[in-house]
Amino acid sequence: MSRKIHVAIVGLGFGAEFIPIYQNHPHTEMYAICQRTTEKLNQIGDHFGIAVRYSDFDEMLKDGNIDAVHINSPIPNHAEQSIKALRAGKHVACTVPMATTVEECRRIVEAQEQSGKNYMMMETCVYTREFLYVKGLRDAGKLGRIQFLRGAHQQEMAGWPGYWEGLPPMHYATHAVSPLLALAEREADFVSCLGSGRIADRLTEKYGSPFAVESALFRLRDSNLAMEVTRSLFETSREYVESFDVYADRMSFEWQQLEGESPVIFTGEKAERVEVPDYAHLLPEGIRKYTTEGVYDSAGNVHLSFTQGSGHGGSHPHLAHEFIMSIVESRPAFPDVYTSANWTCAGICAHESAMRGGEQVKLPKFR
């Protein structure tokens, strides 16, 4: 492609975090924004100097100048909008989760295969400082043979937009699932999950999911490894955490218990806390600063992704860079459409297992 990649962002809450990243990336033009609320659309457009604005998603897709669409809309819209954008000939990046049903995941895979365009689920947890640090240990052979993996994502969602109320915990499990599968370089094969505790009836009504906590044990495909994932969204007291632990024969890594602490490395019986470095040096110079600051910082209006989870571990510019470079280099993004589907269906199938009393559920294969 001779000119810069024209990017459109859909959804301007969390989505606005990515506007200056694309504005400062050497291969992109932050071309258009899309938001249903006209007042917010114009507010963001004026603030960032973006002239092309849409309040209708379908109208935006008719714009032939748009090469890539980054979707940050509510979860119920992810599948439909991803499929429409792929069928319109656009590359697609979509915030997590990919979808909420196995069938929707299958339809996205089919749309990607038919279009030939890239699809990337923008999973923050495989581009955080902590993940990149442990991946470096793995790649250098310092971990040795991985023996077991554990992930958790616990968060209180009271007060968030209404579609979150009563959401099955495992339907939003990718933050806990993805770093484990990425480090193991395997897909999830089957799962047995138990639900525990109860949330209020008013929360249960929307999705029919009664559990306060869902905890799952997975077998990894073509592997002797297992992993454990625990997820909660409502009425469970815990400081916010998106964590992963990796146990290997030479070295193990455990996430810190409290957000202000440092993680722990174990070598044999010896344990020490480690300071995880930033990885901005892996990025083009113009977007390096966004590993440590959000777009609202100067105005004092900090998005929840920076007050909870320390800005998703500096992952935002890494995600955008990977998406764009996959297009520039004509290669699949990481995660590609198949990996995204497996990571998403791990949670979907885990919730199905919980609703069936822990019965083992086999994940579908997408390739």
Image (spheres, rainbow, N blue to C red):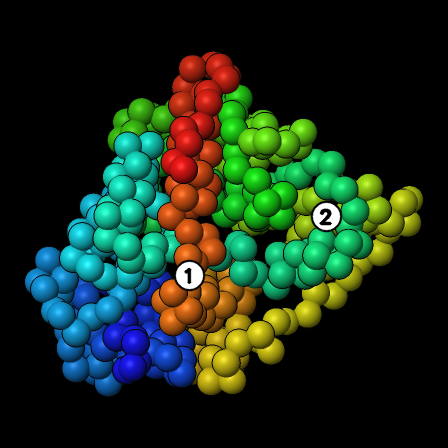
Q: Please give the name of the residue rendered at 87% of the width and 49% of the height, measured from the top-left corner.
A: 267
Identified by mark 2, the residue type is Glu
Q: Please give the name of the residue rendered at 31% of the width and 43% of the height, measured from the top-left corner.
A: 109
Question: Which one is closest to the eye, mark 2 or mark 1?
Answer: 1
- Estimate the spatial distance between the alpha carbons at disc 2 and disc 1, rounded to whole Å: 33 Å
Secondary structure found at label 2? strand
Does the image show residue 316? no
Residue 331 numbered mark, or none:
1
Q: Position of residue 251 (x, y in %)?
A: 81, 48
Chain-order first, disc 2 or disc 1: 2
Identified by mark 1, the residue type is Arg
Q: Please give the name of the residue rendered at 27% of the width and 66% of the height, measured from the top-left corner.
A: 68
Q: Position of residue 249 (x, y in %)?
A: 82, 41
Identify the residue position indicated by label 2 in the image. Answer: 254
Q: Position of residue 72 (x, y in %)?
A: 30, 58
Which quarter of the rendering shows the N terminus?
bottom left
Front-lying residue, 295 or 298: 295
Question: Crowdedness of circle 2 by 10 Å Cα count: few (<14), some, many (20+)?
Answer: some
Front-lying residue, 335 or 291: 335
Q: Is residue 199 above or below residue 247?
A: above
Front-lying residue, 153 or 191: 191
Left or right, 226 with respect to 33, comes to: right
* Quadrant position of residue 229: top right
* Quadrant position of residue 211: top left
Secondary structure found at label 1? loop
Q: Are marks 2 and 1 in contact (CB under 8 Å)?
A: no
